[in-house]
Structures are given as C-alpha cells and as structure tokens.
Image (cartoon, helix red, strand yellow):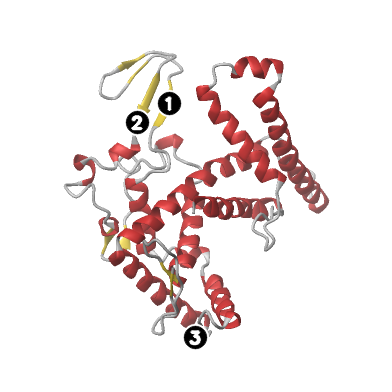
Amino acid sequence: MTSCWDGLTYEDDVALHKVGFGVEIGILAPNLPENSFARAFDTANIIVTLRFIDPRWKIKKFLNVGSESLLDKSITLIDDFTYSVIRARNAEIEQARESHDDKQFHRHKPQRRSTQLVIADRDTTAATLSWAVYMLMTHAHVAEKLYSELKTFEEDRAKEEKISLIHCGTEDSKSFNQRMKRFTRLLTYDSLGKLHYLHAVITETLRLYPAVPQDPKGILEDDILPDGTRVKAGGMVTYVPYSMGRMEYNQGPDATLFDPERWLKEGFFQNPSPFTFTAFQAGPRICLGKDSSYLQMKMAMALLCKVFRIKLGMRAYSEVQDDDDSIDG
C-alpha cells in the first residue's frame, strides 16, 4: 500500500511544481511510465540512508566509485531536471517583464526549496496515509463517521455549486467516473478546510504514528537547554515524537487510544501546540511542507474513503452498497 501512496505523493509534490513552475512529472499516467527523475530520487534517498551503516562511504565518495558514484549521477539528474525547469520559467518571466527593476529568481534557492519539499513530503506522507488507512480498518466507528462527513460534504457542496449527484455502481463505469470527477472538483483548497473530522483523523494518526518517530539534532556549539542541561558541541540531542504522543502527561489518560474526537471542540478542529504535538517540529524549525502535506493527505483520504469501505481480511472484495454508493474492499 505504501508504494501506491508513494506514487500518489510524488505526483502531488510535483503538482506544487506545476503550480509554481509549470511542469508535471506524470508518474501516475494511465500506462504508469518509467520515470528517470523518480528513479534517481529513490536511488539517492536509499544511498544516503545507507551511509549510516557503511563506514566506507567517505572513501567511496573520495574515489567516486560504487554507490557514491551512483549517488553523484542521481543527484546530477535531479539537479539537471529542476534547474532546467527553473531556467525555462525564468525565461518566461523575462519575456513578460514590464519593467527592468524586478529581480530574477535566485538560481539555487528555488531548486533547493522545491527539492526539499519533495524530500520532506514524499515518504512521510505515504507512511502516514498507510497508517491512517490501517487505523480506519481497525476502528470501524471512526471510518463510519468519516464516511458520514464526506457524504454530507458532497451533498452540501453539490447544492452550493448547483449540480446534481449521479447514482452509480461498479457495473456502470461511466456513471461512476462522472460521479468521481464531480466529487474531485468539489475538493477545493477552501472546501477541504471544512472537513474537520478528516483533519482530526489524520492528526490522531500522526500523534500515534509520527512519520519521523525520532528526530536527532546535531549540536553546533555549547549550549544550555531550558531545564538547565548542558550540551557540548559535536554531540547529539534526540527527541522522540513517537513516545511523546503516547505520554499521559502530554495527551491525557487515554493517550494510547485512537480517538480523533480529542482534537475537536463542538465539531471544529482545534490546532494543538506544536510543542506538545511534535510531528512537524516547532518554532523556527517547523516543517515547511506541513500545510501541503495535510492538503495532500486530506485529498487522498477523501477520495478513498468516500468510495470504499475498507476492512481487514484475507481477501479483498468489492460490492456496491445500494444505500450509499460506497464499495467494500
């Protein structure tokens, strides 16, 4: 399942590039084409991770052999792609410029920021979506309440847009596709903000299963922590969001329970303090992709949970429900 989410989050991350730079990768095209950017990105990610257990990586890097040679080629491909996009976009801006006072894009900043967003969003978002689906499988009452929110959302938005809803089933792919296309168009940036229970489901998943379960920080210079602990330059300080999300003094006596309701007050989502809900870090180091990650996850979960009833079982099956157009699977 995570590999499916990987492809989706790749495409969603690159949708940011489509908005900002006018290009899309197309990894989820109907024929699922091989994509050199995605392959290079995965390769670089794996090799950098393996450095933690490979004491020879610095030697291989110096000699430019083995995995480090492949890493260098992968990074070059990634940089070439993003720089080419930025150059093309810069040229368009130059052509449309009305005055010579406007500043050009800095050549490196857009490339680094766009690459950082893909790195930050891709694996973390895919892992969170996988855990969220599992939580719905093991908490049927949550899945039912989420479906109810999505069904009401579709009906209300259809009234706002003055469009009719099409009854559909798996036997009629044409009407099913039309219904899904209409539902997708209803999922705008503003309307997704109204799905408070869905936001709570994702947040509760991140509390119990944070995408980065422990987060080490390098110490650049001697310092004193707020509790008086002295730390020395060159050392490491690690905090563990996985444990912090399950501590009763942080989350209450029901800290180990999956309960999206804890984030709601009178049906509206209440933003937690980032210093107690640490899935996205806090302060100046808070995650740059937090909002885009929530947007991606809410879009994906809304589409999935509106159509499918997901259950744990040895075999997958599909069956149209006459009363609500949902499909078991």
Q: Tell me the amino acid under the disc marked 3.
A: His
Q: Is residue 197 above or below residue 276?
A: below
Q: Residues within 10 Å of mark 2 (few under 14, many from 20)?
A: some
Residue at image position (42%, 39%) is 212
Quarter of the image for residue 323 reads: bottom left
Residue 200 visible, this angle: no
Instruction: Specify the quadrant that holds the C terminus.
Output: bottom left
Left or right of 239: which side holds 162? right
Residue at the disc numbered 3: 167
Depth check, front residue: 287 or 75: 75
Query: Mark 2 and 1 residues: CB-CB less than 8 Å, in contact?
Result: yes
Q: Tell me the amino acid under the disc marked 1.
A: Lys
Q: Residues within 10 Å of mark 3 (few under 14, many from 20)?
A: few
The x, y position of residue 59, in whole percent, is: 63, 14
Residue at image position (31%, 22%) is 225
Residue at the disc numbered 2: 239
Depth check, front residue: 109 or 43: 43
Considering the numbered disc 2 on the image, is that residue within a helix, a strand or a loop? strand
Left or right of 62: which side holds 133? left
Could you tell which of marks 2 and 3 lies nearer the N-terminus?
3
Q: Residues within 10 Å of mark 1 (few under 14, many from 20)?
A: few
In this view, the residue farthest toward the front is 314
Residue at the disc numbered 1: 217
Q: Is residue 32 above or below residue 146?
A: above
The x, y position of residue 207, in whole percent, is: 33, 47
Q: CA distance from mark 1 to mark 3?
A: 53 Å
Residue at image position (32%, 69%) is 145
Considering the numbered disc 1 on the image, is that residue within a helix, a strand or a loop? strand
Query: Mark 2 and 3 residues: CB-CB less than 8 Å, in contact?
Result: no
Depth check, front residue: 10 or 93: 10
